[in-house]
Amino acid sequence: MSIKDDKAHAVSDAAAGKKGGGTILLFFILGFAASMVLGWVVFPQLLYSTKSQPFDFNHALHNEEVGDCESCHFFRQDGTFSGVPSLAQCTDCHADVLGESQDEAVFVQQYVHPEREVPWRVYSRQPDCVFFSHAAHVIKAKMDCATCHGDIGTSTSLKPYQENRITGYSRDIWGQSIAGFKTHTYDRMKMDDCAQCHEQAVEAARQAEMMDPVTRHFRQEIAPMIYPLDRQAAVGSSVQTQRDACFVCHK
Amino acid sequence: MEMNARQHKFGMVIDLDKCTGCGACMVACMAENNVPFKVDETNKRDSITWMRVYKLTNGKPYPEADACFLPRPCMHCEGHAGHSPCVSVCPATATDYSSETGVVSQIYTRCFGCRYCMAACPYHARYFNWWDPVWPDGMEKYLSPNVSPRMRGVVEKCSFCYHRYQLAREKAIYEERDEVAEEEYQTACTQACPAGAIVFGDLNNPDHQVARIVQPDAHHHFTGHSKIAFRLLEQLGTNPKVYYLTEREWVRKMCDQYNFGPQAAGH
């Protein structure tokens, strides 16, 4: 009798164990899914606060009027880049309301007449430790604005500014994809993105230099003997990383 | 970045017989580079001075008594192939040697404050930020935007006013020139020195004044050709890019233990 009872218990225990295992698996899957949603969807929503610009701006319209980016975003005489135009530049044309848009009325009433600079939120603002030379990229390397800034020049309105609550920087620095994927060069503006392009440039220069064996032999063997003062061209100028030296982009 | 560009080696030569010890270089350096200071600066072990003027005395009674002032920036040691003492020990790649400019860089946001570099530096040229900088009211507006301020817990040091080179290069690019002229890139201490004791330029460029004075001997570990030129702690082999000049032998002996001319080839 007792043996039979034990057997019955064992059978029901096994059934219960199987059932329990299923429940645990279900909870695991649900928990996993929930934490994934939390991490990939909810957290990014919480991390960024959406802020609007003082008023909307139509890049496409202005581009049609003035013709190119450099008319407003110009280089100063000393080679530095002016960046976002100051109020004085805008008032060259906008001393009074020109069009019929509500945003321009706001601009003229709240900023032009009281002579207040517009507190634009800059999507590409970088930390203090970054040195970026527009001249080196635009004039020397002949890069297009759109390579880093995207199609902002043809946009008809400003997108909302998503500010990282922790760092205070724009979401455009990390990129829209929280996983860090990017399809265009202008999707992100992190150090990795600068480094990626710089590494390609260093590699291209190295390849070009090593093209023919005579040059290679001269540069590696003969030149250091004749000109001991001149350093042999390294892969990159950094001794630590063999890439571009840190002070190329830092200050 | 520029593989075919000339390899610069920015360096300095300081004439100790011209230096009066006025300290203008120290002031200019602090103002130029947003160097933080405290209300009480009496404890020199935790204060920050990228450029520091030391006073040397020969310890003799009058009339032989003599004093010499020795300004000490970062030496930007080249070591062997860019392996300067601090760069070799940095576990964070926060400090780096550039073969393009010969400048030892320090990236404050990369530094985590282990201070190995401070222990490795034989010149005490590196300083640790024990506190976040606190500026007197209103002074924040006078900080230079071209130099990033440092935070608590990182090491900082003289950069040869590298931001000035960055800006000078930007201007050169804008004007479609390949090279930055000698007078376009000068450090703040060089320009501030009323006695003209500090000369700064490219040691690789024979047209630059600094190269003409020093004439670094590439076959003898870049020691200066002149008999009155020497470098601090030459025998350590740090291969610094700051040279000193003095006619006074006791100063040379004190800084160097013995004169390391091109004749004394052992290193």
Image (cartoon, helix red, strand yellow):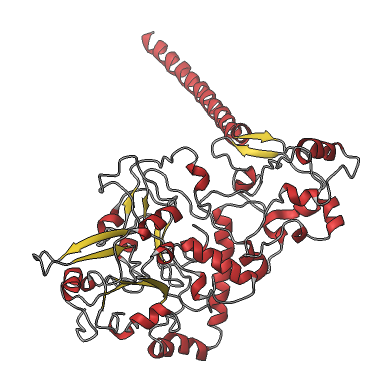
Q: Name the quadrant of the N terminus of chain A.
A: top left
Q: Is residue B181 left or right of residue B157?
A: right
Image position of A81 (left or right of A227): right
* Left or right, B50 with reference to A249: left
Residue A51 lies left or right of residue B183; in this view the side is: right
Q: Residue furthest left?
A: B61
Q: Is residue A184 above or below residue A44?
A: below
Residue drawn at x 83%, y 52% as measured from the top left? A62
- Residue B216 is situated, as x and y percent measured from the top left of the image, at 33, 81
Q: Nearer the viewer, residue A70 or A147?
A: A70
Task: Report the front residue among B121 and A185.
Answer: B121
Q: Is residue B34 above or below residue A215?
A: above
Q: Position of residue A154 (x, y in %)?
A: 81, 53
Q: Give residue B72's quadrant in the image.
A: bottom left
Q: Nearer the viewer, residue B226 or B216?
A: B226
The answer to whether residue A231 is above or below residue B61 is below
Residue at 23% in and 77% down: B247
Q: Is residue A141 visible?
A: no
> x, y (%) of residue A23?
54, 23
The residue drawn where x is 76% and y is 52% is A89
Q: Residue at x 91, y 40 (%)?
A: A100
Residue A242 place in picture, x, y as percent: 45, 68
Asked whether residue B110 is in view, the answer is yes
